[in-house]
Image: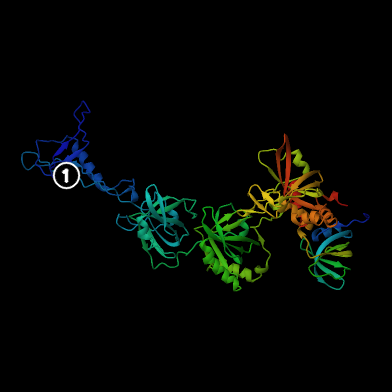
Amino acid sequence: MDTSSPAVFVNGEILKMYLGRRVRAVVQVMRNEGGVIIGQSTDGYQLTIKGAQSLPLSHFVEVIGVADGNQSIRAEICTDFGDNFDTVSYNGLCQLANGKFKNLFL
Amino acid sequence: MNRELLVKNRQKLSRRGRIIIILNMEVIIPECEIIGNPSLPPEAEPVSQNVSSTNNSGSFTRETLNGSAGSDSNSVARLVSKSSANPANGAPSFPPTIQPSYKPPPMYKNRGAIMKNEAPARIIPIAALNPYQGRWAIKARVTAKGDIRRYNNAKGDGKVFSFDLLDSDGGEIRVTCFNSVVDRFYEVVEVGKVYVMSKGSLKPAKKNFNHLNNEWEIFLEAASTVEPCPDENDSIPTQQFNFRPISEIENAENNSILDIIGIVTSVNPSVTILRKNGMETQRRIMNLKDESGKSVELTLWGEFCNKEGSQLQEALDSGFFPVLAVKAGKVNDFSGKSVGTISSTQLFMNPNLPEADRLKVWFDGGGKNAASQSISKDVMPAFSQNLIRKTISQIKDEGLGRGERPDWVTVKATVSFIKADNFCYTACPLMIGDRQCNKKVTKVAGGNWCCDRCDKEFEECDYRYLLQVQVQDHTGLTWVTAFQESGEDILGCSAKELYKLKYEENDDIRFPEIMRRSLFEQYLFRLKIKEELYGDEQKVKITAVKAEKVNPSMESRYLLDLIGRHSV
């Protein structure tokens, strides 16, 4: 497993803490605009995913890339997670991974 | 008037003089001349004047109890003699003055005129009624009327009926009539009409049957009055509800009574149910949904199935989703939480209430398609049930199963091995009531199967799982026995199918495949743990009653909750 540049689990609120860093987030596709996906993060923020191919609306997609704005990510890898995803659990994970249990994560 | 008195008793009290205390008097001659030469003691004069003056002023401050205690004025005739100033003839003449009969002082209310006994009592709110009230009258609308119930007890045959009242302040009370009183009022009282009622007795309400918000109940008697009030229209509502959102029912106590309102989303057909007393009754289940995001099962019993049940069914068949208001439904916690009708329940389809309008607007505006979680199913997310979660090592470390009663726990574990031999047993397929016998059957000469319990022979037997399964989690390893349901959950096919596969078709490919693919699946096992005697050894026996494949989403939420609770 390549641990050279780990991606931090983020949601809309946590994203701004990691500007310039590699992050991963799951967003729900709201709009496709030619190479850009507008998605809703698991905590209800609207995020702009640049450099992503079009994906079906209301599907969940995991984006791994660099945070290049308070509400945008420059995507490197996009994975379609389908339309059945538990955002509540993911959001809980983001909060724990950046809070109390940060030391458990790379 | 002169009266001759017969003194019945007298006592000599004081050495200074003779004092006579008259304990009893009986008039033997109504009119008589003065006998002898009586004279008054010197102090009598001023005293007698005082007595006579105070008698008439009525300045008593204590109240006399009226109403059921009986308010007849106690007349006590008192004879006080006044010495006349100038006797006309030589002999002193004493025209004794009879004081007026003792009347109890008039009963004063806080405000208003002094009431006489004959005037109608003032109307008071139902909430103010109590047994010590004295005379009262209430004006209320009948919200419910029960049937006449006949009974037989040690005193003989009797009949009784009750009806509920609601007044303009929202107070409610139940009224009950027995025997002859039933005849007087049963036809008079109609649901929806307003009456003025007075002269009933107040007693504590029987909370088992009376679910109204009042600690008292009225019992009508011979002297009671119930007058119809035809001109009363709007000040008293026709019915009073205290609706709870369906989401609150989840936390309601079993057997509690409440009012609910919701949109009927489905109606099942009536089924005939055999009751414990041998009588048959109808049961009908329907689903109610409201804006709280939860839905609940409503069970109709008896008459409700045919009457309201059919009406609701018709509405749904025509494509309408009616609003249903339930007054006095009973909470049942047999499977999740559901609500059922009782004898005093009332159902109102599409009632004219603001809550009903609100529901309709919500439903038509999108509520129809909104997801709704049923509180009446047993399948609730693991974390919201109060199920005890244990790890495998805890079973041994905590000595589970050693107590008097078996321990029931939930364990998340992975199947690591299933014994392929003797995975099932031959079971009796005959029905005992509504359950299958399932006792182990033996083969007899001739090829048939024989069941000892049912005492019958038959050709085909049933096959039921008796799986020995090894399960593991991060703390340890143990063996559990899985019977029919959990066996099917784990292997994904019935015991009969598997038996055929192995022993009749001798399928060496499919059988091992089924066994293999069941391994290394993670389940939430519901375990029953009990120590039992095997020969002369105490062994802890673990039975898997249920094996549920772990749902990642629900399990994640459970873990999130667990983490939150543990790390404060």
Question: Left or right of B524: which side holds A18?
Answer: right
Query: Residue extending furthest front?
Result: B446
Q: Secondary structure at mark 1?
A: strand
Image coordinates of residue B39 in percent, x first then y, are 13, 35
Residue occupying the point 86% across, 60% down: A24
Q: Is residue B181 visible?
A: yes
Image coordinates of residue B268 in percent, x first then y, are 60, 65
Q: Quarter holding the N terminus of chain B?
A: top left
Locate residue B535: give its quadrant.
top right
Image coordinates of residue B26 in percent, x first then y, are 18, 40
Chain for numbered disc 1: B
Question: Left or right of B508: which side holds B530?
Answer: left
Query: Residue extending furthest top?
Result: B15
Residue occupying the point 87% across, 65% down: A78
Give the total number of marks visible in the rendering. 1
Q: Residues within 10 Å of mark 1 (few under 14, many from 20)?
A: some
Residue occupying the point 33% across, 57% down: B113
Residue indicated by mark 1: B97
Locate residue A60: give its quadrant.
bottom right
Image coordinates of residue B238 in percent, x first then y, are 47, 65
Query: Residue extending furthest left?
Result: B90
Locate residue B400: give its quadrant.
top right
Q: How is the image coloured?
A: rainbow
From the viewer's perspective, is residue A27 above or below residue B155? below
Question: Left or right of B20: which side holds B493?
Answer: right
Q: Nearer the viewer, residue B416 or A67?
A: B416
Question: Left or right of B108: which side holds B126?
Answer: right
Tell me the kind of residue under disc 1: Thr
Q: Is residue B549 visible?
A: no
